[in-house]
Image (spheres, coloured by chain):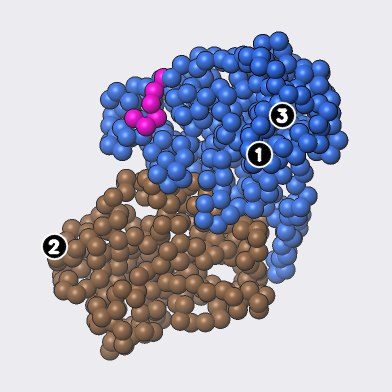
Amino acid sequence: MSENIYKPYLMEIEQVVEETPDVRTFRLKFKNSEEAEKFSFKAGQFGEYSVFGEGESTFCVASSPTRKGYIECTFRKAGRVTKALANLEVGDTVGFRGPYGNTFPIEEWEGKNLLYIAGGIALPPMRCVIWNTIDLREKYKDITIVYGARSVSDLVYKHELKDWAERPDVKLITTVDPGGQTPDWKGEVGFVPMVLEKVAPSSENTIAILCGPPVMIKFTMPVLKKLGFQDKDIYTTLENRMKCGFGKCGRCNVGKVFVCKDGPVFSYEQILTLPEEY
Amino acid sequence: MENSRKLIRKQSLEKLYNNLSVSRKVYAPVVAPDKQIEYKYNPGFSDVTFDHIRSTLSVKNVVFPKVENLFYYTNSKTESTVKDIDLNNIPEVVLWGAHPCDNAAFDILRSIFCWDIKDEFFQKRLDKLVVIGLACHSSDEYCFCTSVGLAPDSARGSDILLSRLQGGDYQADILTEKGEYIVNSNKDLFENVSGEKIVLTSVKQKFSHEQVTGKLAEAFEHPFWIENSLRCIGCGACAYVCPTCACFDIQDETRGKEGKRYRSWDSCGFGLFTLHTSGHNPRHVQSQRWRQRIMHKFSYMPERNESLGCVGCGRCSSGCPVDMNIAEQLEALQNI
């Protein structure tokens, strides 16, 4: 990157996937091939995506570093920047700064079972590490994914859910909130914490990775504890508001940490040392 | 280099000021028509004050402007281009007559902007800055530099520190190579010291910052924060006048197809500062935001930046519309 740390790379939108009525996934490729060559990232890192004239918005890189030549991001139309992003089409330009932040310690997880638990729009920050570990499948034991959304139409990555469901080496449990099911829905009906309790995955030699809205985290944590998970074996990503992405603008400061520098990935053991300002 | 001490006559200051103005911008304090003290670029020497206690705003904008352009862009739907800012255009600036509290803040700002990735916008401005400080010969009830490890004649952050002598001339402590360069370029204006005494104010110590920092480690859940911030209206004035507050926002501004992305001063005292798009706000009430301000300066920064986030200038208290006095609060906090 140039010495101007605020200057973004120019990226071309190569593909747009309409995940749900208000969620899109963009595949982005570098306009400048030299920048593409130099760029690398790891699972868990994030970036600042911009529409010039509207501003920047923070999302995790949603694609796996094992898939070269592009990055993907998934976002919900919610604020000024994401609404402007959603109006863009294939061939249009966006800005990207990154990668920023720490990473999921997937090397430390080698030889263990992985339990991914995500709710709603929180699957995207986990998709990167899910594909990363599936692409390195022989290094991990059982991979289980529990994913829930309000309704069937709110489930993101529908094609990939189908792929994961069909793979013999991944156990996928999908659920929708009561009332969110369609007549042909074959998954579970119920909130993520209840479904998790019912599925009751073993905590033996297992790492749990948890991402979701605060209310889901609040009710899922006791279930994980009941299943015997230790705080140090539970990971999540914090999603504090950010502007700069490198520990200067002050927004994501929680206690002594900057979520953008020390996170976004934290073990639950670390989270317990922070004031509840996330 | 070895620090050295010289004397400069009162009547030579104008010559020095004018010499410095030839190749640099000089940023100096003047008394505005409304009696407020403000720093201006290149005021005439006769307008420059040597008797101010504190300017309304700090001088941090010489290294961290209120609004700083980060780059320019052109934007049509399919074609966007980005044009960098030429940092070589940043001018050389002499900060003239700023007090030790303000000058100590540059180091603190550097600990924020240049830990980890270096912020070149800040660093270039700091590199091109020469600070001619002025030790304080007067102070008021808002001053508390001595409570945060500084003093009316602290040298930290100054390249040359002037102190008024009893007869009205000035003692010049030459503290850095930048300062030495200026003295060497104006040799005829500096004389050997005479032994005359300097006029220095005394500032009463109100609290011990070590004790405050120690107390804060256990005070997060204390009712103190709510009790002491009920009157806070969250206006952010404390952050805008503060020499060390560095939180900023980033925004775009477009006219037609051309625009710029800039950063501008912000404050952790605003509810919008941490508000998520979802509506969730980690610091949703004012007492949490007041606590963040104090915690950041007196607990998080000493650990993270190895530097207190306060220089005791007193501006946040003198400028507060509801008279919240940080020194009084820290004094009270020390005893909870």
Label 2 packing within 10 angstroms: few (<14), some (14-19), many (20+): few
For residue A82, what is the image quadrant? Answer: bottom right
What color was chain A assigned in the picture? Answer: brown
Residue B284: percent from the left, percent from the top? 39, 40
Residue at the image point whose x is 81% and y is 36% from the top = B185
Quadrant for the N terminus of chain A, please: bottom right
Above or below for A46 versus A90: above
Give the residue number, with chain letter if any, for mark 2: A226
Label 3 packing within 10 angstroms: few (<14), some (14-19), many (20+): many
For residue B52, what is the image quadrant? Answer: top right
> What is the spatial separation of the Cα atoms under label 3 and label 1, in whole angstroms?
16 Å
**Which circle, 3 or 1, is nearer the viewer?**
1
Residue sitting nearer the eye, A26 or A236: A236
Residue at the image point whose x is 63% and y is 14% from the top = B197
Task: Give the mark nearest the N terminus, 3 or 1.
Answer: 3
Q: Is residue A220 left or right of residue A56?
A: left
Residue B17 badge: none
- Chain for disc number 2: A
Chain ID, blue in image: B
